[in-house]
Image (cartoon, rainbow, N blue to C red):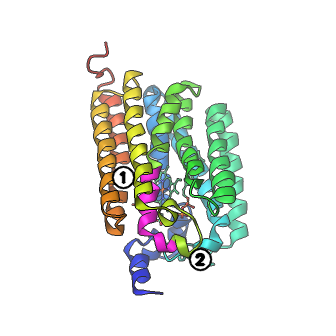
Amino acid sequence: MSRRDSRLKTEYAEPSRKRSGLIADIAALIKLRQTTLLVVSMYASFILGGGIGYPLKMHMLVVALGYIAISSVTAINMYFDRDIDAIMPRTMERPLASGRLNPNMVLAVSISLLVASLALASIYINIYYSIAIAIGFMFDIVAYTILLKRKTPLSIVAGAVAGGAPSLGGWAAATGTIDVNALLLSLLVVVWVPAHIWFLATFYREDYRRASVPMLPVVADPNVTAMGIGFGALIMGYVIVGLWLNRVIGAVSLAYGLFASTHLFAMAVNYGLTGGDEIYARRAFKITNMHLGILYMVMVLEKAIAPGLSLGLD
Ligand code: HEM
Ligand SMILES: CC(C)=CCC/C(C)=C/CC/C(C)=C/COP(=O)(O)OP(=O)(O)O
């Protein structure tokens, strides 16, 4: 392994590399940090949909079934990706890639938990929450992982739809349906994904090249990638305004959302100007994740503290 690879391998170690044992392996298997932000997107949509007044039991069901469903889908993705994960320094220490966990056992348990989450959601929440889980599974595992990831940079379009599915489920748990506002909350994640993955894939360009995974930063000029991230940031701004005009979010969330999307656009421009510099891209990746997490926190707090703060809409 080259000096650079060993730097990459350690620079961005996943939880299991820092700690050992079954708990760390499970955390790595379910990509705990990614799954947590996905559940945050689901719970935020539940609160924005009016879930705040629901009994605690419903809040716990939305979060618990979200974790079970998203963790299961992520583990199934790792089952199918264990061959290429074993090639990339970033992922070669993962439980399945490294052989520490039995793939067939993981697949059986994950499918069982996924089916259980679908059934429990239909019974205790509603059918639309289950439909959101099914959309997440179909777009992440069938479309993204099995059909597209190893063939085309457009694979992240499917992955993005999967990433937007939790928002559909959270909104549906509060409102009983999937409407245009649920789609807007889902679209917020979808258009954030290009910045998320393409900044990161730039830092791990050699990893993806070695595993023959055609992420855009591997196969295209940095200005093409910058253009994709820039358009995603632009559409994110439109989605934020649409959510405010529909009274889903208030003025404070509008302000932060526009700041975040403008910052993403500026980082896309700088990314292009630096010719896709890896170190800049890694910092931009972290900032991109931070913006989405803070935006959800602002939206939920504003809904809880000042639900009527809409600044001139009334
Ligand atoms: C096409 C869709 C997506 C792709 C290809 C993707 C890919 C990745 C990759 C490769 C990592 C690094 C994992 C590691 O080595 O530790 C990662 C981390 C992460 N992802 Fe995603 N992701 C996608 C969608 C999402 C979505 C929709 C969310 C949340 C709404 C999300 C949240 C995160 C978080 C929070 C991390 C951890 C970041 C950190 O550790 O600082 N991802 N993602
Ligand atoms: C409601 C529900 C069940 C929704 C599913 C949400 C979900 C798991 C989205 C996955 C997003 C995604 C494509 C991650 C990248 O995987 P990767 O294989 O490219 O990442 P890696 O290289 O780190 O393994």
Q: CA distance from mark 1 to mark 2?
A: 27 Å
> Residue 293, position in %: x, y?
37, 47
In this picture, which residue range is highlighted in magenta? Answer: 194-207
The amino acid marked with disc number 2 is Ala
Position of residue 275 in the picture relative to residue 153 (left or right): left
Mark yes or no: residue 96 visible: no
Residue 86 badge: 2
Q: Secondary structure at mark 1?
A: helix
Viewer-nearest residue: 173 or 185: 185
Viewer-nearest residue: 92 or 123: 92
The amino acid marked with disc number 1 is Thr
Viewer-nearest residue: 273 or 211: 273
Rendering quarter of residue 262: top left
Vertical placement of residue 64 versus 52, above or below: below
Q: Quadrant of the C terminus?
A: top left
Vertical placement of residue 250 versus 93, above or below: above
Badge 1 is on which residue? 288
Q: Which residue sits at x=38%, y=43%?
A: 233
Vertical placement of residue 30 versus 251, above or below: below
Vertical placement of residue 63 versus 181, above or below: below
Of the two numbered discs 1 and 2 on the same chain, state the one appearing first in sequence.
2
Residue 224 sits inside the magenta stretch: no
> Residue 282, position in %: x, y?
36, 64
Position of residue 7 in the picture relative to residue 210 (left or right): left
Q: Which residue sits at x=58%, y=47%?
A: 162
